[in-house]
Every structure is written in C-alpha cells, then in structure tokens.
Amino acid sequence: MMGQFWKLITVMTLTIGSFNNAAFAAQTSSPIAPTSVLTDLDAALNRKDATAVTNLLSPNFTHGDGYTRQSLTQSLQSLWQQYPNLTYRTEIVKTEVKTNANEVETLTTIEGKRNLKGQIWKIQGTIRALQVIEASQVRSQTILAEQTQVRIGEKPPTVTVSLPTTVIVGKDYSYDVVVQEPVNDDLFMGTILNEPVSAALISNPTRLQLEFPSLAELLTGRPTRRRPAAPSIGDSMVKPIKLSHMKSGGFFKIGRASSVPETQWISAILARHDGGITIATTRLRTVK
C-alpha cells in the first residue's frame, strides 16, 4: 500500500513546481497578463497537456532544487499517470518588474485521488514559489514553502502541522503535528522522517515499506516482533520504516537546524489501528 508514497511525494513536489513555472511563463508587460496566462495554463494542466506547459520553460531553465526542463516534463507525465484527475489552482501573491525580467510569487494548490489496490489515496498540496520570467519564458524557479498531505484508507487521521518555512543554521525550531480528532481509546502509530530535497531523489526515489507494531505492543507499549506491510512497488531501493505506538495525539518536537544551508522534506506518518494513514510532508529551508 505504501510502496509508491515517497516517489509520489517527490514527483508531486517537482510537478507542482513545474506548474508554478508554467503558469506565468508567457506573461507580458500588460498588468492583466498574469491573470490571463494563469487561466490558460490552469486549463492546460487540468487537461494534462505536458507539451503546452513545457514549451513555456526556457531551454536554459534552472531550478533551486537542481531540476531540468526535461525532468520537469517527465515528472508531469509520471504524476498524471498515477493521478489522472489532478486539479490545479494558482494565485498570484505578488509581482515585481525587473529591468529584463519579471519576478512572480505564486501559491499553487493541487488536489486529486486514486484507487490503488482497493485503497483510496487522496492528495492535497500547496506550494509557494518564485519564478523569474524572461522573454516570455520561465528562466528559473525557487520553492519558498511547501506542504503536502496524502490520506490513505477510510479513516485517515486529520492532522495540522506547525513548522517554520525557514530556520537559521544551528538554531532550534519547533515541529508540532496534532491529530484533530479526539484520541479517546483509539490506537495510533507513527514516525517522523527527514529527507534532503534533491533532483537525485526524484530520479531514484526511495520506496517506503512500513512495519506496523503488533496489537500486543499497541496494548502494552512493550516492543514485540514487527509485522511488515505489503511488499513495496517499483524498482528503487526499499527503506523499511518502523511505526511506533503513540501515547499522545501527535508529535511535539524540538529540532536543531543543520550547521550548513540545506533544504529538507520533513514527513510525519500517522496511522490508525482500524484503517487509515496520513502522511504530512513539509519543506524546511535552513539558511545563513
């Protein structure tokens, strides 16, 4: 069930970014052009026209995460194969006119769902990004903030995440993931993952294989032999992930930023004993 999660998250991150690029690639100096182009590009993405979107990227396109024009196109097509009903909606946050280019900050929302071996997967994601537009094409893009949730099964936990978008190198930060429903007598399992944001992770994604605690461990809190999930799907390296019994309705952590600038995806995986998993992924940028 969980085999394609990490590939999905990494590809989705790239694909939303490519949409932000494309959404403003054809804008002109007219003040109404961004809205007009946004409408046209929303339509192209919602009808899954990868060629129309990709043609709006500069041949010399660069991305803050290391992606290329070609990898963006490939990721769009891969994601649409998995989620053919994805919908996109982009809003302009602000626009700044430069001498030879425009800088456009956007907020993009995507939603979609799929049926994978009888399990319903639902995606909701938002990305705030900065595009540099030059000569009617997108020259570069930087992801400023990102949150994604994948909800699986009939009763996935509803969670809220509190994490700063940026943190100074070496400084502490708070990371809270709160289950919104009353916990009562429900049995919850979960864990937290950190992964670097990189183009290599897109081209060779890690597959997660969840290992659930036994019912005896959930009831007693004492470790027993783990029960692995169904085999993962795909050809990439498998990463076993152990879920632990949660004694509270979420995670409440203090982290410390790395000593050098970097960007990470921080993911909380939370599962109910009676069927339902939520994976909440947030981008954290460490800066000087």
Image (cartoon, rainbow, N blue to C red):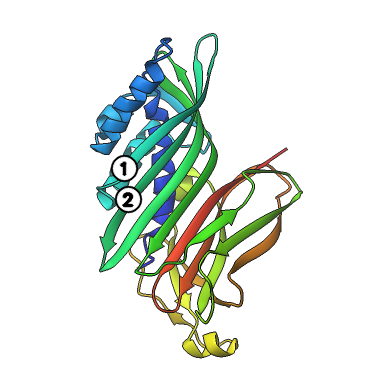
Mark 1 = which residue?
Answer: 87
- Quarter-of-image position of residue 37: top left
Whether tag 1 and tag 2 are in contact, CB under 8 A, the answer is yes
Residue appearing at x 49%, y 14% in the figure: 101
Q: Secondary structure at mark 2?
A: strand
Pinpoint residue 183: horizontal percent, then vertical percent. Answer: 54, 74
Pinpoint residue 2: horizontal percent, then vertical percent. Answer: 39, 66
Label 2 crowding class (10 Å Cα cut-off): few <14, some 14-19, many 20+? some
Kindly identify which numbered label has been placed on residue 278: none
Q: Secondary structure at mark 1?
A: strand
Q: Earlier in the sequence, mark 1 or mark 2?
A: 1
Task: Decide: is 123 above or below 247.
Answer: above
Pinpoint residue 94: horizontal percent, then vertical percent. Answer: 52, 24
Task: Decide: is 82 above or below 177.
Answer: above
Of residues 182 and 187, the one nearer the viewer is 182
Asked if residue 256 lies left or right of residue 39, the reply is right
Label 1 crowding class (10 Å Cα cut-off): few <14, some 14-19, many 20+? some
How many numbered discs, if any? 2
The amino acid beneath tag 2 is: Gly
Asked if residue 19 lies left or right of residue 226, the reply is left
Q: Can residue 234 be seen by looking at this rendering?
A: no
Mark 2 = which residue?
Answer: 112
Residue appearing at x 43%, y 69% in the figure: 209
- Quarter-of-image position of residue 251: bottom right
Task: Decide: is 79 above or below 2.
Answer: above
